[in-house]
Every structure is written in C-alpha cells, then in structure tokens.
Image: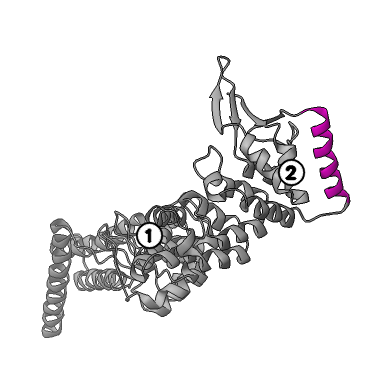
Amino acid sequence: MEQVLIWPAQYPMLLKGLIEQNGAYILDAIEAWPNCQQMKDEQGVTTTVLPPLFYLAWLRPLEPFEACYFQHIDDYDDKQRQYVNSVIQHIEENDTDQDELIKTLIQRLGQYSNIQAQAQEQSLSFVELLCDKHYEKTLIWLLEKGLKFSAKEIVALWCNSSEATHTALLTHIDTCLLDRAATAKLATDSLLDGQQTFELLCAMCDKDEVTGLLEQALLFQLTQQQVKQSAIITLVTQGAKGTARDSSGRSAIMLAVENGFVSAVETMLPYHKVNELDESGRNLMHYAAASNSAAMIEMIFEHGDDPTLADIHGDTPYRVAMKNQALTSKQTFEQHGIIELSNEAKYQKIKTVHILYAFAAILLPLQLFLFFTDEVDEKTIATLVTTAASIAIFVFARRKRSNPLYPSSSTPWSLIGVNALAWLSIGVQVLFSVLVLIAVLSLQ
C-alpha cells in the first residue's frame, strides 16, 4: 500500500514567517492549514496531511530515494517551491546546524501554536522522527518545555540518544511521562529483550521491583539461542546476581557458567551458596564441565562445589565432560586427580575381576582331581602349585578391585556368588595344602 505525504501550500508561508519572525505570516499559515487526516482512495493509496510541526523536522519534501515511509509530494506553486529551495540552499551553503535550526523554528512556532497538541495522536511519532534524525538539542528542549511523551516515544528516545539526552530525560521524567505505568511496562519488556533500559526503570520503579526485573532480564538473555556476552556483562554490572530460575530449576548463574562467561560468573559467584542444585541435582561444577573452560572449572573449584557429586541420573561433572566431549574439562578434572571410567570400561573391569575369581574357584576341583588321580605321582607338588596359582590369581583380582577406578555400584547376586566361591575355594585349598604338608612331614 502506497503512503503519500502532502506538503500543504501554506508551508512556504509558515517557513518564511518563522525565519523572518513575522507573526502575521505564521498565523495566516496556521489558520489556513488543511485538516490533519489520512484518506485512502480506491487504488489503495493513503494520503496524509500532518500538523506543521512535522514538516519543520524535514524542512523540505524528501526525494524518492530519501523517503522511507512516505512518498513526499508538495502542493505549492513554482514561486513557493523556489523560495523553499533557496532557503535550503542557504542553509547548506552556510553549514548551519540543522538541529539548532529546527529547535529555533519549533520554539518560534510554539509562540503561536500548541506544540503538544500537534505532536500527539498522529500516524507518525514526532519524537521518533527527531530520534531518527539525531536532533538531540531539539529533543532536550522539548523535554525542558514539558512536552508529554508516550511510552513508546520515551523508550525509543532512551534507546536512540546520547548521554546528554538521557540526563535531560531523567531530570524531567516526572513531567514528560504521558502514562507512567505503560512506560514502565514497555521499558521492562525492552530490558527483557536486551535493551539497556535499566537506568530508566530505576527512575520510574522502586528498588525491589527493578531488582526482580533485572534478574528476569538476565535469565531471559541466557535462555536465548544466541547469547550476547556484552548484554550479560551489562546486566551483571547493573546488579544482577543470577538468582532467577527457569522451569527446570536452572538459575541464571548456572546458564552463565555453562556458556563460559568467566567475568560475569566471577561477579555473581559470591552471592551463591556452595553446591546449589537444580531440579536434576546438578551443581555449578556440572555446568562448568559442560562449558569446556579450564578457567571456569578452576573458579568453581575455588568456590567449593563438589566435583564428584552425581545428579539424579548418576552423572558426575567428569561424566558430563565425557558426554559432551569436553576435552579441556576432562583434562582439568584429571589434573585434580578426578578420573572416572566409561560404562564400557566399568563393565570390562568388573568382567576381568570376576573372571579371575572364577578361575580361583575352579582350581579347587582341579587340585582335588590331581591329588586323587592315579596318573599324577607328585601329588604334593601338584597340590601346592595349584594352591599357589589360586592364591596368586585371587590376590591379582583383589588388587584390581581395590583400584580407585573400580566401579562402586551395586553387584548382582550372581557375581556375589562367584566372589564367595573364590573365597571358599582359596580357604579350602589352603587348608588342604596344610593337611598334605603335615601328612608328608609326619611320614618322614
């Protein structure tokens, strides 16, 4: 749909009156100014006429390549057009500060017309127009004049202006707000969306309310797919402590740790207890492991979080590092003496130990067979050799089981039975060997 902005034939007279400070011209132009309205024809073209105030911000009709929203069409004759062009040419040749010029023209217009009435309830925001053109001197004057700004205009002004304009806005915040509640809500939404409206909120809301909003803003930023570290650091600098939690019980600091934002986490960490848990039973060390950052893990070590704590799924921070293929995290844990086995490696260790137990148990019937068979002459030696072999295998199995990396999980009853048989076998073999030795010695 095409949007057309009409420049009324009265504009050149208004511009001349404002420049020459001729009240008669100004009043005649204002009185003859057409009704401000929007009309849509059958072809879908919307024609707009705005109050005089808006045209002063542009000074002249914009060329098609300059205009973004409206197509600018003037409605004055050649003589009037020549006058406007000559004024613009004079301004450009003298390098006149347009911001200062616009402020002066609006000040003079304000002596004959209500600026507030012209700026409000229009299809285009006058404040946003000035923001787009960076006319900050004009904006500051409007604030000082007591012009009432809508919620959208206040937030747009704050987000698109310099420190000088911020100072003026905060100074006149009580007089320039058209709707304080609506402005506070929009500023809150902007803060949650990553805009730097914290200081503006502080001027409109009490401290506790702002603190809560700040925490929610930090959590919101950290749950986005593309997390901006600069936004996180800004919120933390403004006082966010990372205490807000999402639906999974993860606090903002946990998400910051996971993202590896060391400087932000360092600031927030003193406000958090050791071994704070989410709903999955994970502490900060689990999230540090997922970050794959040695600096982050070292910081959480210094904080005192347990590096061996298992969550409800049985995953320790070391296990998290292995699952996420976080090699740096894995190496950092190992430097602190924390090493764990994969499920396959655990299975292999349990398997090896109990195979050795089984061999130790099997040697008892072999020993008895060798002793009572007529085919073996050296029964004493056979008995002692099988006993020694059984003891050696059993001791080797026990050493493997006493290794710190051996799984501490519960053992099935079948494997407990193999273990018991091994102990029984060793006991019987040793006792039998002692009896054989006593018998041999007594015969001598």
Q: Which residue is at a point 64% across and 34% down the rendered structure image?
A: 32
How many numbered marks does the figure carry? 2
Does 83 lie within the magenta span? yes
Q: Residue furthest front?
A: 24
Is residue 86 visible in the rendered image? The answer is: yes
Q: Residue furthest right?
A: 93
Residue, disc 2: 15
Q: Position of residue 317 (x, y in %)?
A: 37, 65
Q: State the predominant SS element of the stretch in magenta.
A: helix
Q: Amino acid at mark 1?
A: Gln
Q: Secondary structure at mark 1?
A: helix
Report the Cα–Cα distance between label 1 and label 2.
50 Å
| Mark earlier in primary sequence (1, 2) | 2
Q: Position of residue 29 (x, y in %)?
A: 67, 39
**Do residues under tags 1 and 2 come within 8 Å of each other at their CB atoms?**
no
> Does 374 sit above or below residue 4?
below
Q: Position of residue 125 (x, y in %)?
A: 55, 44
Front disc: 1 or 2: 2
Magenta span covers which residues? 77-93
Query: With 75 as the anchor, is 244 left or right in this view?
Result: left
Q: Amino acid at mark 2?
A: Leu
Q: Residue furthest top?
A: 42
Q: 116 or 269, which lies in front? A: 116
Q: Which residue is at a point 68% across and 55% down the rendered structure image?
A: 103
Splitting the image into 4 quarters, where does residue 367 fall?
bottom left
Q: 51 or 160, which lies in front? A: 51
The quadrant in which the C terminus is found is bottom left
Splitting the image into 4 quarters, where does residue 271 fall?
bottom left
Image disc number at residue 6: none
Is residue 323 visible in the rendered image? The answer is: no
Residue, disc 1: 216
